[in-house]
Amino acid sequence: MDQQQPPTLSSSSSSAAKLVDPEKVKVIGWEDFEQELARLMSLSSALQQAKDKSHSLQDKLNSLIQIKAESLNRANELEQMKEKLEARRVVMEKMSMLSKVAEENAKKQEERLSMEVRSLLVSGTALSVARRRLQESNKLLSGEKGYGHLENLNKMLRLRQQFMIQQVSLLYPVKILVGPKQEQELESFPSSSKSGSAAGSKPINPGSLTILGLHLTMLPFTKISLFTDKKEVQRSATALGYIAHAVSLIAHYLQVPLRYPLHLGGSHSYINDYAPSIEPSSSDLLLSTLSSNTKPVEFPLFLDGQDTTRAAYAVFLLNKDVEQLLNFIGVKSLGPRHVLANLKELLRTIQSAEYIDT
């Protein structure tokens, strides 16, 4: 059998010779075969170990590659988390700034609210004081010296005014001339009321009225000539003096400051006009001018040596004073040229019972 093995080897070597270059084929002797075989076996074992190590290294390398990939993924995730954290940090900084601004605004609002609360407390205190005063005022008004007492005082004042103006009416009686030498008191004739002329009453001719027996005619104030009766002019001036004195007394008793003050002098009386000759640029300038710089212009209530236009304007202003008093007691004027008729209406209304109840 030992002799048959070489042919086997020769056959295998012959087959290997077909694959390997013949020049590189190493011929091993039989005596070296066992050593070569052992060496080949050791090489085969070493190769197998190398393959095992290679496989283990390949496995380790794969695990390392997987770990590296996982670490890269983790690094990417950490980078993303870092970016998110940075974005959150920026947002937190913005929120911190906004919170600081909101805190400052809250402090300002708190200060403002505290000021408002203090002002409300002060207002509440003032309101309570005002309420207490109002209650005290209501008690005073409802007491013996309250509103009823004031009404009684007002009625007494009007009665006193009525009495004093009755004295003026007795001092300067205004009558109507019904005949050549017949005069009657005006109270016996129908007159106008606060809403105007009474129903069914005929208007009285202003030319038929007299004051203290003197007839007031306006003809000399509109047209004067050499043939004008001087006595008639004197009687008209005296009548205007009576009217001016009566108006001055009535205004004093009613406590009404006349718009056009009177300078009494009997039949040589004057009336003052504070209207400026130059128109002011504003109402404030008008008030300051009237109060300080404007001097009154006097207009005569007579014609003796005077201009008829100025005298007629004086009669017009006197009638304006009478209309002012009529408006004060709520009575309508009879017209701009009815001085004596307006005075008669003024005296009649104040002496009536309606004046006490107003």
Image (cartoon, rainbow, N blue to C red):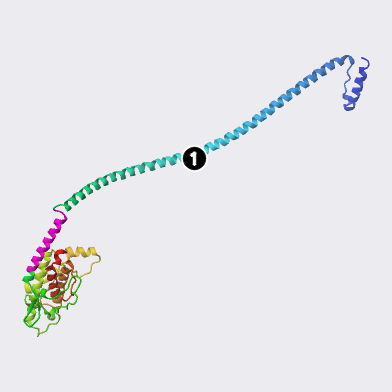
Which quadrant holds the N terminus?
top right
**Residue sitting at x 43%, y 40%:** 99
Amino acid carrying mark 1 in the image: Val
Residue 132 x/y as whole percent: 21, 47
Q: Which of the 4 image quadrants contains residue 225?
A: bottom left
Residue 66 x/y as whole percent: 66, 30
Q: Left or right of 147: which side holds 179?
A: left
Element assignment for label 1: helix
Q: Which is more toward the observer, 170 or 280?
A: 170
Query: Pointer 1: what residue?
Result: 91
Can residue 297 be seen by looking at this rendering? no
Could you tell me what secondary structure mostly forms the magenta stretch? helix
- Is residue 146 part of the magenta span, yes or no? yes
Q: Residue furthest bottom?
A: 227
Q: Left or right of 39: which side holds 182?
A: left
Q: How crowded is the residue under tag 1: few (<14 C-alpha within 10 Å), some, or many (20+)?
A: few
The magenta stretch is 145-167
The answer to whether residue 220 is above or below residue 55 is below
Q: Which of the 4 image quadrants contains residue 309?
A: bottom left
**Residue sitting at x 67%, y 28%:** 63
Q: Which of the 4 image quadrants contains residue 83?
A: top right
